[in-house]
Amino acid sequence: MNKNRILIIDDDENLRDGLINLLELEGYEVQGVEDGKIALELLEDQVFDLIITDYKMQDIDGMRFLKTINRQYPTLKVIMITGYGSIEHAVEAMQAGALNYISKPVEPQKLLKIVEDSITISDKRPSKETDDRISKFRHFQDMVGQSKPMQEVYRKIQEVAPTDIPVLILGESGTGKELVARAIHDLSPRHAGTFVAVNTGGIPKDLIASELFGHLKGAFTGAISDKKGKFEEAHEGSLFLDEISTMSIPVQISLLRVLETSVIERVGSTKSISVKVRIICASNENLSELIKQQKFREDLYYRLNVVNIELPPLRKRKQDIPYLVNYFRTLFNLELKKEIVEVSGDTMQILKNYSWPGNVRELRNVLLRAVLAADSVIETKHLPAELTQNKVGTEIISIRAGTPLSEVEKTMIIQTLQAVRGNKLKAAEILGITRRSLYNKLEDYQIDDKKL
């Protein structure tokens, strides 16, 4: 049975109910509304795989609605229902972005075939050849999700990809910043060039310059031969620099010089090498705060932050969790040669309710372990204890009137850390502060989390 969600928009109640019944019999999850205005309100907090809308409606007509959808939800698929013989309406709808159209009177079997074909069509511009069983779950390039926050991400990618403008991707760890960078590259004029990704946070600080710009033999201890840097490798392509907040000030200065001149020098050399590279950077730290602390150069920040794309944490796009769960279930079935057919209802509810401090990366790891452990159905027993026995927020803490606010805050930090078994990332998320702020407060209040 299909689990795809379809939204029907038609002010003819009889036709609307008929379409709902027809599609529900085929296993689709269907919802119907009478006009485009209600539909747009519904899309604020619900996700659908497909919309079927009438051309002529009161309030917001089908064409106006379609143009709004294309602007706000660029990957959402829309089928337009047109009046009998209204070929000019059908052509207009297709030019405005409709995936297909259906003429009235609606023929049930023709409708079902168009719906099935529309839902199984993956992104029109795939980044690479993939198994159809996997690609059908992807909504944009290699990304999964139909929620409004993700649609905004897709829209920004489409806007900036054709240009050579530097892009700064912001978001917590595990939200998929490299996927965004790859999508920008794959949809850009540089797509035939090399995409080079560098996690600068994983490179010792004294070796970052060598990794980025290359070095000559003998430039430093261990430099046994000449080496190209990542900038040269990415020539005519794109260079993705993750965790740029970890770069030392001297490397930041060198990066700024490259952005201004498109010229690099290998470590130990005075010879200039011209490079044509599109720079895409990412950070999970607040760079504005680091500028105040004089740990990040303000001039570099403004050169990199021409356009920024902020990735939402998974807890702010929970509507996408069922899509991600089924994507990972299918992916790991193929990789592990398993046949997990579904995720139980109770299990899915737990996955949707969990706060996911580790974001999509954490969800992926949970599903990998679950697919390994399960036989045919993923059940609650296949989930880790922190999901099934999450008691954060259930404990009542009594605080005496007149207690200093600093003591209240210290107590809340200690209690939260105890509840999450010392997981600082999760504790910071529950307390509504950054991980860096939590570390600062642990130091200020002299809390030894190892003794909690």
Image: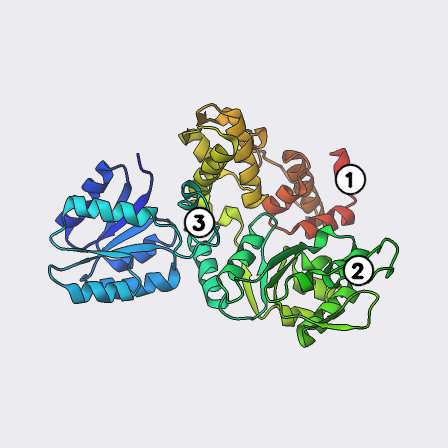
- Specify whether 354 is left or right of 294: left
Earlier sequence position, callout 1 versus callout 2: 2
The residue carrying mark 1 is 448
Other residues around mark 3 within 10 Å, as few (<14) / some (14–19) / many (≥20) = many
The spot of residue 426 in percent (x, y) is 62, 42
Q: Position of residue 320 (x, y in %)?
A: 44, 46
Which residue bears the numbered disc 2?
226
Amino acid type, callout 3? Gly
Q: Which mark is residue 142?
A: none
363 w.r.t. 148: above or below: above
Q: Quadrant of the C terminus?
A: top right
Task: Name the residue located 33 percent from the left edge and 61 percent from the top edge.
Answer: 69
Q: Is residue 143 left or right of residue 110?
A: right
Would residue 17 be seen by someone viewing this image from the given angle? Answer: no
Please state, as top left, top right, bottom left or bottom right, where the N terminus lies in the image.
top left
Q: Residue at x 87, y 58 (%)?
A: 220
CA gap between label 3 and label 1 equals 40 Å
Judged from the image, the secondary structure of the residue bearing numbered disc 2 is: loop
- Percent coordinates x, y for residue 311 in the rendering: 53, 55
Q: Which residue is mark 3?
A: 145
Of the two numbered discs 3 and 2 on the same chain, state the one appearing first in sequence: 3
Q: Amino acid at mark 2?
A: Asp
Q: Is residue 380 rendered to the left or right of residue 105?
A: right
- Residue 188 shows in this picture: yes
SS type, badge 1: loop
